[in-house]
Amino acid sequence: MRVADLVGRALAELGVGHAFGVVGSGNFHVTNALRAGGVPYVAARHEGGAATMADAYTRTSGRVGVLSVHQGCGLTNALTGITEAAKSHTPMLVLAADTGAAAVRSNFRIDQDALARSVGAVAERVHSPESALADVVRAYRTAVEQRRTVVLNLPLDVQAAEVDDAPVPALPSLVPVRPGADAVEALVGLVAGAQRPVFVAGRGARGAGPELRELAAASGALLATSAVAAGLFADDPWSLGISGGFATPLAAELISAADLVVGWGCALNMWTMRHGALIGPDASVVQVDVDPDAIGANRPVHLGVLGDAAATATDVRAALDGTRTGYRTPDVRTAIAERGRWRDEPYDDLTGPGGIDPRTLSIALDDLLPAERTVAVDSGNFMGYPSAYLRVPDEHGYCLTQGFQSIGLGLATAIGAAFARPDRLAVAALGDGGALMSAAELETVARLGLPMVVVVYDDRGYGAEVHHFTGEDHTTVAFPDTDIAAIGRGYGFDAVTVNAPSDLDGVARWVDGPRERPLLVHARIASDGGSWWLAEAFRGH
């Protein structure tokens, strides 16, 4: 067989879940080899979209997603999506064709290893037919075991070379990193002495929900998440929801009054802690993580625990005597029940000639759309509304590809998540800027018949900049009205335009069925004067 065939077969046997890409001459054979091995493949319209699809698929499914791209321009087209995945520590594989050793004057030739490393990805390479299988296994293990985005470069001359078939080695199962006894004892002491403990779970705690809930119940801790782990404690009466810029006023009040904050697989960065404002001056701060470099990276901590979130929570619970009331008082429970969601907060409805209030829109959509949903949110002034108002069933129901803070990734995020959870309705929440930037992938949604709702919060411009640069000339970031619903219909969507709540009847009819085509909701948004989380976000710029 050829090396390209071996690469595809080996990855299929290693267990990659889904592949996304744009096929060119350089990655044609390896992509077909993946398909022949049983790996489903999605043809995107742009490599940038394909990269984010693979990223979102990996985050939502827990299986390794694959991006397949052509040499040179195929890789550079995908670079923003790869950067997002790398910064978010997504265990993803990029199969990048590369020019052969003799093609020194090829227009496709760039230093692909250096390019990968420059954005934080790991550069790997299939060096020869003899090393091909070992090279592939090494790249796969690096992605899975180190939670890294790996760019595996595949030189064309090596891809075309003949190679003997060989069995793919069985990989050892990974044992969760258990914390040391001294660390467990120290954390038990802090938990036992806390009157108002709060647990904040991040991406590294996804999958550890049951263990964290059990420990929180025993220690009297309230539960919260970073944005990327939203939904982890969705049905818990002691959950405060998202901590940080999207936090409700009640969540901010209770977290900032905590005397112990424990971050579980959570970076405790400026977004999650509002530049430190959510940590009281007398609070003890603990960070639990499997990565020693992550502990204390964003702020000083009183205790760092090197360990898996679930394993650490289990060991601490076993060593903790009895149960405590802690923060779980009747008054706090009542407050969470009455004010625990953004929709419980009163507001002046801005709906009028300028469009529908984004809060009114989001509350209505939350009521109309099925509860079993996966919400994918793009970046922009609007993004807090779907993040805060659209409920999700669990941590697999929300996907935020915003480690690199690029707009235009939300639609592709929803596509990847839709393949990871085909049993749920995928909801893409986009601004008009991100929607138009990624519009080509609307065709992918329609072509593949994905059950999806695309909601465009249209404020006719790059809203964050409009509000941030107040009093300045906005002609560079404001745009005339665009009929985005017509664009959706052109790609094969059903579409409705929403200026007021009554216009949402079209959404209700689509939900009732038969949902033969995806739905685009073009919502013309009334100006909010700058969303509530925007001022916090721009403090970091």
Image (cartoon, helix red, strand yellow):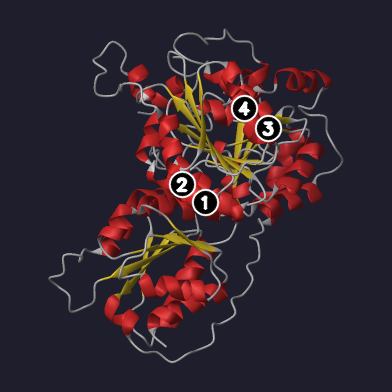
- Viewer-closest of 383 and 282: 383
Q: Are marks 1 and 2 in contact (CB under 8 Å)?
A: yes
For mark 3, what is the residue? 198
**Spatial CA span between label 3 and label 2:** 34 Å
Residue at disc 4, secondary structure:
helix
Q: Tell me how far mark 4 sits from mark 2, CA to CA.
A: 21 Å
In this rendering, the label closer to the viewer, 4 or 1: 4
**Disc 3 versus disc 2: nearer the observer:** 2
Q: Specify the label residue 412 is tagged with.
A: 2
Tell me if residue 140 comes above or below residue 381 in the rendering. below
Instruction: Find out whether the residues at labels 4 and 2 contact each other: C-beta distance under 8 Å.
Output: no
**Residue type, numbered disc 3:** Val
Q: Residue 365 carries which label?
A: 4
Dot label at residue 416: 1
| Label 4 – label 3 distance at C-alpha | 31 Å
First along the sequence among labels 4 and 1? 4
Instruction: Give the alpha-carbon distance from disc 4 to disc 1, as whole Å.
Output: 22 Å
Percent position (x, y) of residue 338? 75, 18
